[in-house]
Amino acid sequence: MRPANRLSRASLAAFLLLLLAQAGPAGAQGIVVSAGREGGYYHTIANRLRNALSSEQGVRAEVRYSPGSLENLARLDDPSSPVNVALTQADALRRYLDEHPGFDGEFNVLADIGTECAFIVAPVGGPVKTAADLKAEAGLAISVGDVLSGGAVTWDYMGRLEPAFRNTRVAHSEIMAALLEIRGGGEFSDVKSVLVVQRPRLSSVLEVVLDNLDVYRLVPIRAGDLGNATLPSGSPIYTFETVRVGVGRDHSASVETLCTHGLLLATPAKLSEERFGQLADVILKSGRFIMPGAK
């Protein structure tokens, strides 16, 4: 899978050099990265970036945990916060810009850190067989994780693009608990599906699905199910792709679904020219090790 808006290495190099020229001399002297939850993909990327800055540039960077993309963006946007680098989903960035238009032009996209896809899980034999079922039937509920999770952000933005999705109530329950709740059709609950947003690789959630394909199904999300929106650059927030999970395992599955991408952002106003240059240099030279999912 390759989103159409990925930058080539050559164009990324030119882009970062241009950003370096625009970075102001004033600002924070340290690099503070707002990442996601401990153990998650964003947290992993942030720690790799921190280690690369230390080993290659002798720069000490700090990684701060967060509940997710929206908090990362709020910290980046807050003049009183020391956070000057952040990770976010593209749809979370679009939502944040819709609600905080003054932030447009105050950040730079340093890198695309890889594809993230939405996986809707529903019980076999249950009422949810396609994404359209979640638009048509009022009274159903979908579990999206906690209110600041990637799943919650994506579901909210899906509802902004296609208001009919709001017919389905949102449950902010823990995802693994929700999988257990919907097992067997969720007879005693109105939660009939679960949404998780992650890289298209195995996780505990997808492992449960693949190990129990007689119990769970992956629900397709197709291009006709909702409209699209773009980032300020004009790049689409979502692509619709056929994603295969569990390759090389005894059980695997394919599903057509929507994918977004993770972004690494910085605010030049909070970075000195020297620090911005060191950050750009590390991304250009070691990006393939820091962000192995990006191409």
Image: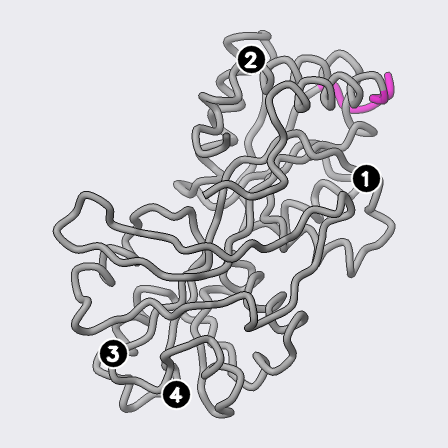
Q: Position of residue 183 (x, y in %)?
A: 24, 77
Q: Residue at x 80, y 20 (%)?
A: 18
| Residue at the spot of label 2 | 285
| Residue at the spot of label 4 | 190
| Residue at the spot of label 1 | 79
The reply to whether callout 2 and callout 3 are in contact (CB within 8 Å) is no
Q: Earlier in the sequence, mark 2 or mark 1?
A: 1
The kind of residue tagged 3 is: Val
Instruction: State the image quarter where residue 160 is shown.
Output: bottom right
What segment carries the magenta color? 22-29
Q: Residue at x 76, y 32 (%)?
A: 267
Does dot 3 land on a helix, a strand or a loop?
A: loop
- Tell me, yes or no, whether the highlighted magenta stretch contains residue 26: yes
| Residue 177 in sight | yes
Q: CA distance from mark 3 to mark 4?
A: 15 Å
Whether 162 is drawn above or below 264: the answer is: below
Single out the mark in the foreground, 3 or 4. Answer: 3
Single out the mark in the foreground, 4 or 1. Answer: 4
